[in-house]
Image: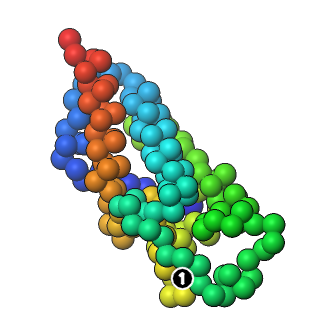
Amino acid sequence: MSLTITVKSEFVLDRLARLSQRMADLTPVMAGIGAALKTRISNRFETETDPDGNPWAGWSPATIKTYPEDGNLTILDRHGKMLDSLTVETTATSVTVGFAEPYATYHEYGTKKMPRRGLLFSDPETGTLSPDDERTVLDILNHFLSKTLP
């Protein structure tokens, strides 16, 4: 599962436009954003919280009953497959962060039988980043802007 974030933040768009005027290749910028978001998403598995810092819902009785004996005993990490499938792909104009495991979608959005345990978005319906994730992206953009000042 990889998801696309369409940037709507005027602050982010403004900084990207200014950077693209100063840098011929934005790949390092996109790689920086991807690495930072990957770290933030990985940390959510440790804190068991969504992008806004809200705790993930606990296991249902059915999950507890069927949990494998060789599991890791943490939410969303039975065997580490989903976290291990977290990937980042960058180009000169984009960064894609997502999971190779297709069931990650169910956790991001939730289902009728399973509560949402957000990983990527503050609001997956709109593709909105959390304020902290957006601030992280802005910090990276500002860093590169400060390095490219004439």
Residue carrying label 1: 114
- Is any part of residue 6 visible from this angle? no
Residue drawn 34% across the image and 42% down it: 136
Q: How many discs mark residues in the rendered view?
A: 1
Query: Which amino acid type corresponds to the residue marked 1 in the rendered image?
Result: Met
- Is 40 drawn above or below residue 114 in the view shown? above
Residue drawn 24% across the image and 53% down it: 8
Pick whichever, 11 or 47, lies toward us: 47
Pick whichever, 77 or 141, lies toward us: 77
- Is 10 drawn above or below residue 47 in the view shown? above
Residue 125 in the image: state x and y as whole percent: 36, 70
- Is any part of residue 79 visible from this angle? yes
Residue drawn 19% across the image and 38% down it: 14
Dot 1, how many residues are within 10 Å of its Cα: few (below 14), some (14-19), or many (20+)? few
In the picture, residue 81 is in which quadrant? bottom right
Horizontal relation, residue 128 to residue 48: left or right: left
Horizontal relation, residue 11 to residue 121: left or right: left
Extreme residue in the right direction: 70
The C terminus lies in which quarter of the figure? top left
Residue 67 in the image: state x and y as whole percent: 73, 77
